Image (cartoon, grey):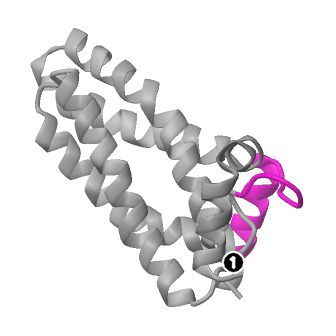
Amino acid sequence: MTVAETIGHMARHPMRFLMTQWNWKAGLLSALLRGAIFFGSTLSVGAAAAARTLMVDAAFRVPMAGVCAAIVQALRWAEPRWLATAIVLLGVPALSHTVEIGVHVTAATPALWRAVAGSVALSIASSAVELVLMRHGVMTVGPGSGSPASDIRRLVRLLRTGGA
């Protein structure tokens, strides 16, 4: 499938796409990692502010990260590969950070830009890693996907073999 066909399919059938491809694995993992970034960045303001920031982040992060990972999964084999990769590495994080900033500005999150900087740094690495893992069948959902335990086994195998 081409990138245009893949995006067209998602746009024409958004509910079917989300109901079958929403990636709960990535949603939970992202909430844990980014929640820790936002919590830690806000902790200097106080424990109550850090806890509130963590709850605000988790409330939108789990659904949003699941959608973003579904997009990555859908584009992982799309052609041309360079365009699919560019969308995954640039477009998906841009969308994610736009929502992230909007939510946290609205919530008046203290120390916001320190947390956003950490989140963007994580995105630089995690988008590329997520794409590579999904091309190897790790962290995917839907037909043919494994459990989190089988994902860990696949990941260990990939690390041992160097991705071959």
Horizontal and vertical percent position of residue 142: 82, 52
Query: Is residue 91 or residue 144 the one in the foreground?
Result: 91
- The segment highlighted magenta reads 140-158
Identity of the residue drawn at 48% across and 44% down? 30
Query: Is residue 87 or residue 42 the one in the foreground?
Result: 87
Query: Is residue 83 or residue 14 the one in the foreground?
Result: 14
Which residue is situated farthest in the front direction here?
12
**Number of marks in the image?**
1
- Above or below residue 18? Residue 92 is below
Horizontal and vertical percent position of residue 84: 53, 79
- Which corner quadrant holds the C terminus? bottom right
Circle 1 residue: 160
Q: Is residue 154 magenta?
A: yes
SS for callout 1: helix
The image quarter in which residue 94 lies = bottom left
- Which corner quadrant holds the N terminus? bottom right
Q: Is residue 66 magenta?
A: no
Horizontal and vertical percent position of residue 17: 71, 50
The image quarter in which residue 139 lies = bottom right
Horizontal and vertical percent position of residue 75: 61, 71
- For label 1, count other residues whose C-alpha is less than 10 Å away and answer few (under 14), some (14-19) or many (20+): few
Identity of the residue drawn at 78% across and 60% down? 153
Identity of the residue drawn at 44% across and 72% down? 87
Task: Please state if 42 lies on the left or on the right of 128 as rendered.
Answer: left
- Above or below residue 82? Residue 67 is above
Identity of the residue drawn at 56% across and 47% down? 67
Which residue is situated farthest in the top direction here?
48
- Give the amino acid type for the residue marked by disc 1 in the picture: Arg
Task: Please state if 99 lies on the left or on the right of 62 as rendered.
Answer: left
